[in-house]
Amino acid sequence: MMKRLVSALAVAVTAALALTACGGGSDPLSSTSASAAPGETTASKVVVGSFNFPESVLLASIYAQALQAKGVTVEEKPNIGSREIVYGQIKSGGLTVLPEYIGSLLAFVDKTTTAKTKDEILAGLKTALPADLEVLEPAAAEDNNSLTVTKETAAKHNLTTIEDLVKVSKDFVVGGPPEFKERQEKNFKDVYGLEFKEWKPTGETTADAIKSGTVQVGNVFTTDPKILLNDLVSLQDNKNAFGADNIAPLVYKAGVNDTVTSTLDAVSAKLDTATLVSLMKRVSVDKDDPPVVAKDWLSQNGLV
């Protein structure tokens, strides 16, 4: 969830630019999307948006192309901005479909939530989201925090879950972003009883630090292609210390029909974390265009 946060200053600047570009208070997407009348359900044109990072752009392209294959007229709006900006667009009907992360979304709309499991988070979203919005069936895929080790470390110490680290954590150096210790030290101790030998700030080099042995375990996002490249293993968060963050389409209900929802659900049913890691390797490492990667995956799974 941390990588999807932006500073308040960046949000304010982006919002100011958006207002300037649209001449004050008009919706910057209003010229490309039509809002349905109250109670009307239409899919004459579905506008699929994304946040401003590559994984979101890829997911939006997957959704968009799957819908187009079913005869739905689709307009794509990639790289719009942060959640603070994009959420307002789908809430107003300027967007119809948005790839979301359920835990991050709930934390955004309900700052007091303590929900951790997928079911708890989905229940919270039903209450916290406005009536015009709905989260469809989540995919198994998650882009979440993890504690990750090398395959050799996992085999040597018989590690499959974070809970398994209890027997070795006092001998392990753990790496992550500079704020990782402050955010997670008490959480890990309360949930799992973990106490590490040392906390080392490794930032974006965490996966490489694990591979080199600089740290024995580290905080790597579960769809980071370096998990594949460095032959790493993300340990299962069997007690939900981080909380579920499954990917799911957030939809503006008045703009979708059964064809749209069933198509999006079919995509989610086939998308898991391992698949997303391999797709993101093509985007981030091999530098393939997201629409090409999306089309290949959809074709392989009979969705186009």
Image (cartoon, grey):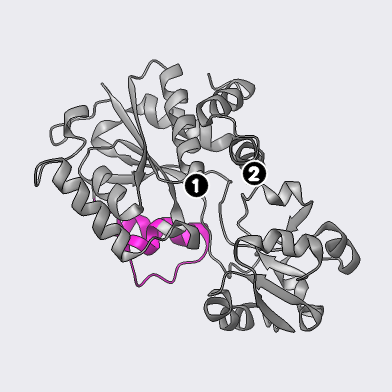
**Residue 94 drawn above or below residue 129:** above
**Front one among 205 and 274:** 205
Q: Is residue 236 visible?
A: no
**Residue 69 drawn above or below residue 233:** above
Q: Which residues are magenta?
A: 105-130
Residue for point 46% across, 31% down: 61
Find the residue positioned furthest to the left: 24
> Where is mark 2, residue-wise?
277
**Front one among 44 and 136:** 44
Q: Quick one: SS at disc 2?
A: helix
Residue 117, numbered label: none
Q: Position of residue 273 (x, y in %)?
A: 63, 46
Prevailing secondary structure class for the magenta stretch in the rendered image: helix
Task: Say which quarter of the image contains residue 295.
Answer: top right
Q: Position of residue 118 (x, y in %)?
A: 51, 57
Q: Quick one: SS at disc 1?
A: strand
Q: Position of residue 35 (x, y in %)?
A: 17, 33
**Residue 81 drawn above or below residue 179:** above
The kind of residue tagged 1 is Ile
The kind of residue tagged 2 is Val
**Residue 110 drawn above or below residue 262:** below
> Where is mark 1, residue-wise?
247
